[in-house]
Amino acid sequence: MFPVNTQDLSPDVPNLKPFMASDLYHRRMANSKAGGLKYLQYGVVGSMSLNNMLCTRCCEGFEPNEKIVNSAGELWHQECFVCAQCFQVFKDGIFFEFEGRKYCEHDFHVLFAPCCGKCGEFVIGRVIKAMNANWHPGCFRCENCHTELADLGFIKNGGRALCHECNAKLKAEGLGKYVCYKCHGIIDDQPLKFRGEVYHPYHFNCTQCGIELDENAREVRSRPGFAANDMNELYCLRCHDKMGIPICGACRRPIEERVVTALGKHWHVEHFVCAKCEKPFFGHRHYEKKGLAYCEIHYHQLFGNLCFVCNQVIAGDAFTSLNKAWCHHHFACSMCDQKMNQKTKFYEFDLKPVCKKCYEKFPNELRRRLGKQHAAQQRT
Amino acid sequence: MSAEGQVVSCIPNTSKMSKAKKVLEEAREIQNPELDLADKGIASFEELPGLLNMMNITRLTLSHNKIKVVPPALANLTNLEILNLANNNIEELPLSLSSMPKLRILNLSINRLYSLPRGFGAFPILEVLDLTYNNLNEKTLSGNFFQLETLRALYLGDNDFEYISDEIKNLKNLQILVLRENDIIELPKEIGELVRLRELHLQGNRLTLLPPEIGNLEVTNKSVFKFEGNDWVTPIADQLQLGVSHLMDFLKSETYRILYGRYQQNKPQVPPPCIDKAKKASRIR
Ligand SMILES: [Zn+2]
Ligand SMILES: [Zn+2]
Ligand SMILES: [Zn+2]
Ligand SMILES: [Zn+2]
Ligand SMILES: [Zn+2]
Ligand SMILES: [Zn+2]
Ligand SMILES: [Zn+2]
Ligand SMILES: [Zn+2]
C-alpha cells in the first residue's frame, strides 16, 4: 500500500520542493484571510527616510509622493514590482513567491504548480501525489469502481490504482477464488453458494437446527419450480438429508431432475458412469460387478469376456481358461488352430492352449524343460 | 547340415504334398476362407500352387511344416487376418509381411529367426505376435519394432534377450508380455507404464532386481505375474515367498525405493545364463 501524499518529487516539475513544504505554501497558509495569496501593500514612505531607500529591482531612489510597493519590508517602484517571468504588473495585486522571485498567477502555475494526471488542470490546494503523478482529490479514483481514493487509501495493482475492495476481488479472481459477498474477503476454502452469490459458509446458520454452516451446507429451493432464488434456504447436510430429497451417489448433491436408481443408490443421469472410463451410460446398458457399474467394453475388458482371438464381446457361452476367454468359434489350439471343446485335453504353454498332438511336435529340448518345470510346480 | 535341412522344395514327400494340394482344391471349391495346412510336410510354398491367388482367405495355418522361406508374395493375401507359421524352419521373413492390412494374429513360434526384417514394426493392426522359441535378441529386433502400438499380446519366450528397450512403453495396448526363459539381466522401468498389462511372464531369466515402477501394474483377479527362476535379491525373494501381491505392494513402498537406489549404486552380481541355449532346436542351421 502506498501513502497518498508521498514526498517524491514530481518528475516534470524541476527544482520544485514538495509544494506543501515550500515557503510559499506556508505563507499562504499563514495568511488565511488572503486566501493563501499575497497582496500588494501600497505605502507612502516619509521624506526623511526616502533618501536612503532604493528599489529592490532597479536600485534607483524614489520620487517624493511616488507610490512605493512595500512587500515584507522590501521596496519597489510600482513599475518595477512585476512578474519575474512576464514582467507584467500583478493583476489584482495577486502574486506568488518562490525562491525569492515573484510570479503572476499564470506563470507560477505554468512554472511550478502541478497538473492533474486526469483532467490536465492545475492543482491548487490539496494535491494528491500518487502513481507517479499529481491529482485533484476528486480526480484520483479507483479504476474499477470510481470511488474517490484520497481519504480511503489505495492499492497499486498492475499499474492501476484500486480501492481495497476491488483489489481483493481482482486478486481473488486471479487466484481462481471467490470473494465473499458479505465481508468482501477472499474465500480460501470452499465457497457457499446462496441465492446466486458466494459467501464464507460461516456467515450462515442452518435454517433447521441453527448450527453454523460449513461448505457442505445445502441450498434448498423452498418453492420448487420458481426460477427466482430469493426464497431459497440453507440447511446443514444432516438436516438436508433428513428432508428426503434423493442424493446423488457420485456427487453427494440433491437430485432435482431425473433420478437413476442403480446399485442401491440414486444418481444424477450424468453422474451414473462406467467405473473404468467414467463415461455416463445415458440409459445404455450397464454391467454390474462388485458394487460397480461398467460399460460393455470395459466390463469385458476387465472381466475377461472378450474373445482372445477375435477381441469381440462374447455372445452366448464363453470358454474361459488360462486367464482368458474364447468365443465358441475361436476356442482352438494355439499351434494348429484346430477347434477344441470342453472335453478336449490340452497343455498350457505360456498360458496358451496347445493340443496334445501339437505338444508332441514341440522340440524335444523344449518338452523336457516344460516337463521339468511342470514337475517342479507339482512339488510346490 | 542335418538330414532335415537337406529336404528342400525340389524333393518333397509326394504323399504329403498331394494332401496339401487336396486341401487347397477343396478350399477353393467350397470357398472356405480358413485354410488348414498344418503338418503336411510342406517344405516350400512352391508346393502350394495357386495359394497366393486365394484372395478370399482370412486364416492360413501352416504350422508343423518344414518351410524355410516365406515368399514376399504372401503379402498379396490382403484379407488374411490370422497367419500361423508355428514350428517351421523359417530363418528370414520378407519385409512385405508388415504391410498386410488386416493381419491381426501372427504366429512365428518355434522357428529359426535370428533377426526380423527392417521395418517389421509397420503392421497396421497386428494384435497378437508370437515369436516364442526363436533366436532373437535386443540387437536383432527391427528398429521400429516397438511401434506395434496395436499389440495386445507379445510372446518373446525362449529367445536370447538380455535387455528390453524402454520403447516398450509405446505398446500401450499390451495385455500380455511373455519374456520367459531369455537371458534378461535388467528390465526397463517403462514396463510399469503398460497400464493394461495383465500377464507378465518373467520366469527363467537372470534378473536380480525389479524397477519399483513394476509395482504400478494393477494386481487383479485377472492378472498373472510369473517371477520364478530368477536370482532375486533377498528382499524380493522374501516377498515372493509371501505371494505376488505382497511383492507388488513391496515394490511400491518407500523402503524398496531406497533399497533399489542403493542397489543401483552397488549392483548385485549378474547371474550366469541358466539354460543351455545351444541345445535349442531353433539353433539348427
Ligand atoms: Zn507573469
Ligand atoms: Zn483533476
Ligand atoms: Zn465473508
Ligand atoms: Zn441443521
Ligand atoms: Zn451427481
Ligand atoms: Zn467404460
Ligand atoms: Zn472369437
Ligand atoms: Zn494343436
Image (tube, rainbow, N blue to C red):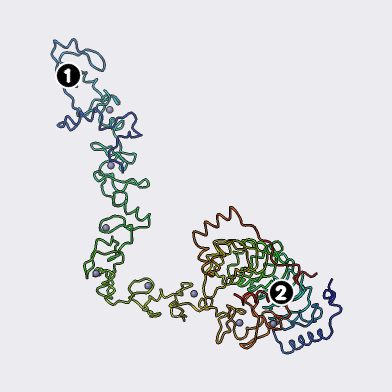
Residue visible at 18% across and 25% down? A40
Type of residue at label 2? Leu
Type of residue at label 1? Lys
Mark 1, residues whose alpha carbon is within 10 Å: few (<14), some, or many (≥20)?
some
Residue at the farthest right position? B11
Front-most of B111 and B82? B111
Q: Secondary structure at mark 1?
A: loop
Front-most of A326 and A134? A326
Queried on whether the Cβ of the residue with tag 1 lies below 8 angstroms from ligand 1, the answer reads no
Decide: is B259 above or below A118.
below
Subunit under mark 2 = A
Decide: is A290 above or below B209.
below
Q: Secondary structure at mark 2?
A: helix
Queried on whether the Cβ of the residue with tag 2 lies below 8 angstroms from ligand 8, the answer reads no
Are labels 1 and 2 assigned to the same chain?
A: yes
**Distance between the alpha carbons at the discs numbered 1 and 2:** 135 Å
The quadrant where residue A55 appears: top left
Q: Position of residue B114 (x, y in %)?
A: 74, 66
Question: Dot 1 corresponds to which residue?
Answer: A67
Q: Position of residue A199 (x, y in %)?
A: 28, 61
Disc marking residue A366: 2
Q: Is residue B243 left or right of residue A354?
A: left
